[in-house]
Amino acid sequence: MPPVPRVALDTGPASATIAPDALGSALVDRFNDSVLARPRVAVCVSALGMVLLVLVGASAPNNHTLRAPLPLPLLAPMPGGASTIAVYISIALSSVGLFGLLGANRRGWRPRPRALFYVGAAVVAVVADLTPVGSSDTASYAAYGRIAALGGDPYVTTPGQLGGGYAHLVSDVWLRTPSVYGPVATWLQSAAAQIGGHRPWLTIWLLMLVNGAAFLAAGHLLIRTADDPVRAALMWVANPLLIVLLVAGGHLDTLIAALAVCAVHLARRAARPRDDLLVGVLVGLACGLKISAVLLGVGLLWPLLRERDWARMARQTSAFAVVSFAGYYPYGLHALSPLSSAARLVSVPSLWAAVQQLGRVTVGPAATGTAISLAWPVLMLALAWLLHRRIPPQAVLSVSAPFALGFAWILAAPWSMPWYTATVWATAALLPRGPLTRWLILTTSVLAFSHNSGGHGWTW
């Protein structure tokens, strides 16, 4: 058998190579030559990561799930040390498996997109029915929904004030924090809580099912609209790392990504004025889930600004403004007040964590917080410009601009979680192959290792 030619995984044009990319290409070349880049091996590695994830979710409660088994206790609770090891290995296997799947695809492996979708759907169906793994955010969603369902204001009332079984499941970090999510998120959470009533497990389960359905809907649309449907499927619906973070965690970011896929699809064709109006509506709904989705809208306006297409800009921004006003009007501007305190948070491994520690002992916490809040948006814009230059030139600007801005936000923001990469992955699935894919995998993996403890912290 002739030797397999060495091909770099998702590498960009040779003329655009810089030192970090040259090093990355060399490492990926070595990976491509290894057994891990063979299709069967990559599939097996990814599958093993999924098996460990399912075992952790099915053996709740443990150190990486909510404090109660939901919806049903399938296995005996897993010891703390065992769950930590299982989660670490699951993330590692999912990351390596994803590298292998994309490497095999780059070397000519072309599975049927429909088969990839069905495999991903089967895994999602299992994971969405288990206790959330890696984050307690779904418990916070349920608590805010219960507050709204009882006639309270989740932007004033905290889960701790709600008390009862809902508060018991919320992480201590968010127990005394009002909702930082938008009105669309509150409506969704309230609807689930109306059905769940005094049974928090049912409310959380419903939210998990909605999240899983959104994940699959986004994957279906990506496969149908991408120039390379096989790569799109591997980047999203059959992506083991995203299943660990988005489906097992049950995060709202999945719904934002699904809306982003729809908005980008409409922006790419934009054959009729109503397409622009729908783009504005979709971005408004996404911002109604999390205000950070405004970056999606900015990214979609970027190409219109360059083309000076003021009419399309006006249609998109007008529709966005109407949807946003309609969403926030019932609650008032105080619905945005919890965001001010959340905006001052700094996470690890953000580079701003070191700045914060140094600033506290030199100029004081107040001045340091102000400096960080002013500096990070500038850094984000600079990184967005640099990242956009690394994207292959044949990419559609309405896809590449949201990707670059979203990825830059992940890298530059003081508070960054692995599930925040959802929209970045969704837009990356529509881009041509390029060197940024491997950096997105590495960034997401590092964040996943740092923030995947089910709200308990890394304990043994």
Image: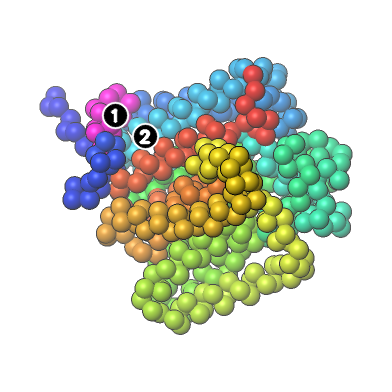
Q: Which SS type dominates the magenta stretch?
A: helix
- Provide residue 383's location: percent of width, then percent of height: 40, 53
Can residue 260 be seen in this snapshot? no
- Provide residue 297's location: percent of width, then percent of height: 51, 65
Residue 361 relative to residue 309: left or right = right
Can residue 150 be seen in this snapshot? yes
Residue 375 relative to residue 28: left or right = right
Q: Residues within 10 Å of mark 1 (few under 14, many from 20)?
A: many
Residue at the disc numbered 2: 99
Question: Residue at 58% across / 75% down in the picture?
Answer: 319
Question: Residue at 65% across / 23% down in the picture?
Answer: 459
- Provide residue 124's location: percent of width, then percent of height: 56, 39
At label 1, the amino acid type is: Phe
Q: Outermost residue, bottom direction?
A: 311
At label 2, the amino acid type is: Phe
Q: Nearer the viewer, residue 341 or 262?
A: 341
- Name the element at disc 2: helix
Question: Residue at 45% across / 27% down in the picture?
Answer: 93
- Quick check: is 28 in the magenta stretch? yes
Q: Is residue 47 above or below residue 16?
A: above
First in residue order: circle 1 vs circle 2? 1
Residue 417 relative to residue 119: left or right = right
How many callouts does the rendering have? 2
Residue at the disc numbered 1: 31
Mark 1 touching mark 2, by CB under 8 A? yes
> Residues in magenta?
25-38
Q: To which quarter of the image does residue 299 belong?
A: bottom left
Question: Residue at 56% across / 20% down in the picture?
Answer: 85
Q: Which image quarter holds the N terminus?
A: top left
Q: Which image quarter holds the C terminus?
A: top right
